[in-house]
């Protein structure tokens, strides 16, 4: 491979140092700043995890109050941005709107964001974390033709998002604490995942010194694809298409067939060659939430049986394909009332915490350089130009 190491898909390249997230894919371990994801999902809140990822430590009570207050101060969007939404078709995919609106924030915070100054970086980070729920909820409201709701800062981060999404000005909205807790947990499970494709995209975009809002828009674009964050939407659509347990074997056969492009969505992972620890929490949460809400969803049975059959199948065992975080999340989101097209937007909302934490870590690293991979050239050798009439 000449002067360079050839590593398509970066399966064996470490692109940076990072102190945020540790994954042992063979053991199914995921730690944020040392804390196991299972413990964080069980005991902490999304705001605590955001503080942990951004600042390195779990906050004290006072620190958490201050952090939550700071975030709440930035929840509103510039009024001009409401006009920007109106330029989209009503049936636009929320992720298309998110790419556009988050990218457009760079036009509003263009001058104030001197990224060499850590204070400005922190403000940009707080703004992004704070505005994401408003932006995602507005994308949803726009799609169904309901008025945008302003944030209400006496609610929790997640409660406020639920109200902006499902509330209407005509009547009071009561946040259901079961739903609030479940969604907050989903956000925790999606907050960061070391150097995945979208985070690497944010780092690469940011490595040139670009505006942070534009960098996060790049991350959103990358997350959208079905091999990455788009898998939650694809997984639920697949479960609905399967519909009943008797159809499962047919879909398992299709997933195994190399001439069929179909894959089991929500299955397999580049790093986990064992059960994704986030999927363990997610499966448990689905059971609890459906139970507490008194909802029965036949799709959950399809998911459980699909998992059971796949994990007994030689193909999936041999290739170490297990359910990932996206396999069960859709069942909960659907029970809460989100349409499938919103699923990846929720992933983007949560992953924004990881993106900004990773971006800050990168910019403050003295060894930071512009990301500039090389290639193995496979085109023609040098040749003489031929005039158009002589070709
Ligand atoms: N169904 C059937 N076969 C699969 C699947 C699947 N879901 N995933 C991988 N394989 C097979 C694949 O065909 C390949 O077989 P072979 O070695 O015979 O060619 C082998 O397993 C390895 O797959 P790969 O595509 O080379 O592995 P990768 O590390 O490049 O891809 C992946 C990882 C997540 C993109 C892939 O497993 C996949 O497409 N899964 C479905 C989409 C999905 O659920 N994505 C969400 C990932 S977790 C959330 C996130 O981080 O965004």
Image (cartoon, rainbow, N blue to C red):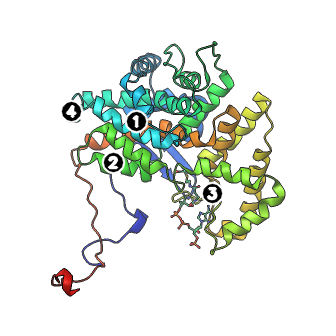
Can you name the residue that lies furthest to the front here? 389
Mark 3 residue crowding within 10 angstroms, few (<14) / some (14–19) / many (20+) = many
Is residue 71 visible in the rendered image? The answer is yes
Mark 4 residue crowding within 10 angstroms, few (<14) / some (14–19) / many (20+) = some
Marks 1 and 4, the one that precedes in the sequence: 1
Q: Which residue is mark 4?
A: 114
Can you name the residue that lies furthest to the bottom here? 390
Q: Nearer the viewer, residue 173 or 177?
A: 173
Q: Quadrant of residue 129?
A: top left
Marks 1 and 2, the one that precedes in the sequence: 1
The response on whether ligand 1 sits within 8 Å of label 3 is yes
Q: Which residue is mark 1?
A: 101
Picture coordinates of residue 172, whole percent (x, y): 63, 12
Mark carried by residue 267: 3
Marks 3 and 1, the one that precedes in the sequence: 1
| Residue drawn 26% across the image and 78% down it | 2
| Residue drawn 78% across the image and 64% down it | 249
Q: Answer left or right for 152 relative to 297.
A: left
Is residue 56 visible in the rendered image? The answer is no
Marks 2 and 4, the one that precedes in the sequence: 4
Secondary structure under badge 1?
helix
Q: Which residue is mark 2?
A: 203
Secondary structure under badge 3?
loop
Tell me how far mark 1 sits from mark 2, CA to CA: 20 Å
Q: Please say if 153 is above or below 349.
A: above
Secondary structure under badge 2?
helix
Q: Quadrant of ligand 1?
A: bottom right
């Amino acid at each position: 491979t000449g002067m360079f190491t050839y590593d398509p898909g970066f399966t064996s390249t470490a692109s940076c140092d990072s102190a945020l997230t540790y994954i042992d894919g063979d053991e199914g371990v995921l730690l944020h700043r040392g804390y196991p994801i299972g413990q964080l999902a069980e005991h902490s809140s999304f705001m605590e995890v955001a503080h942990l990822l951004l600042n390195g430590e779990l906050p004290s009570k006072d620190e958490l109050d201050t952090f939550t207050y700071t975030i709440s101060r930035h929840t509103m969007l510039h009024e001009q941005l409401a006009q920007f939404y109106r330029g989209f078709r009503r049936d636009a995919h929320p992720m298309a709107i998110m790419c556009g609106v988050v990218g457009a924030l760079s036009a509003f915070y263009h001058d104030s964001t001197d990224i060499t100054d850590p204070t400005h970086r922190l403000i940009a980070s707080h703004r992004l974390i704070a505005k994401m729920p408003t932006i995602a909820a507005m994308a949803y409201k726009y799609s169904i033709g309901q008025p945008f709701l302003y944030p209400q800062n006496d609610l929790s981060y997640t409660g406020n998002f639920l109200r902006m999404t499902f509330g209407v000005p005509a009547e009071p909205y009561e946040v259901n604490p079961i739903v609030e807790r479940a969604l907050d947990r989903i956000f925790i499970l999606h907050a960061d995942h070391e150097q995945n494709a979208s985070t690497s995209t944010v780092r690469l975009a940011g490595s040139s010194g670009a505006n942070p809002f534009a960098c996060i828009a790049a991350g959103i674009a990358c997350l959208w694809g079905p091999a990455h964050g788009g898998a939650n939407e694809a997984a639920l659509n697949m479960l609905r298409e399967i519909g009943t347990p008797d159809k499962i074997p047919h879909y398992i056969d299709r997933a195994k067939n190399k001439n069929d492009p179909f894959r089991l969505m929500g299955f397999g992972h580049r790093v986990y060659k064992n059960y994704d620890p986030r999927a363990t929490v997610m499966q448990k949460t689905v059971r609890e939430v459906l139970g507490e809400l008194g909802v029965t969803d036949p799709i959950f049975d399809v998911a459980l049986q699909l998992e059971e059959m796949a994990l007994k199948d030689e193909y999936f065992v041999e290739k170490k394909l297990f359910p990932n975080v996206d396999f069960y999340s859709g069942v909960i989101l659907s029970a809460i009332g989100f349409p499938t097209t919103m699923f990846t937007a929720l992933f983007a909302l949560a992953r924004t915490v990881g993106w900004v934490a990773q971006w800050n870590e990168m910019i403050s690293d003295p060894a930071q350089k512009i990301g500039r991979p090389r290639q193995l050239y496979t085109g023609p050798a040098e040749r003489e130009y031929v005039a158009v009439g002589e070709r």
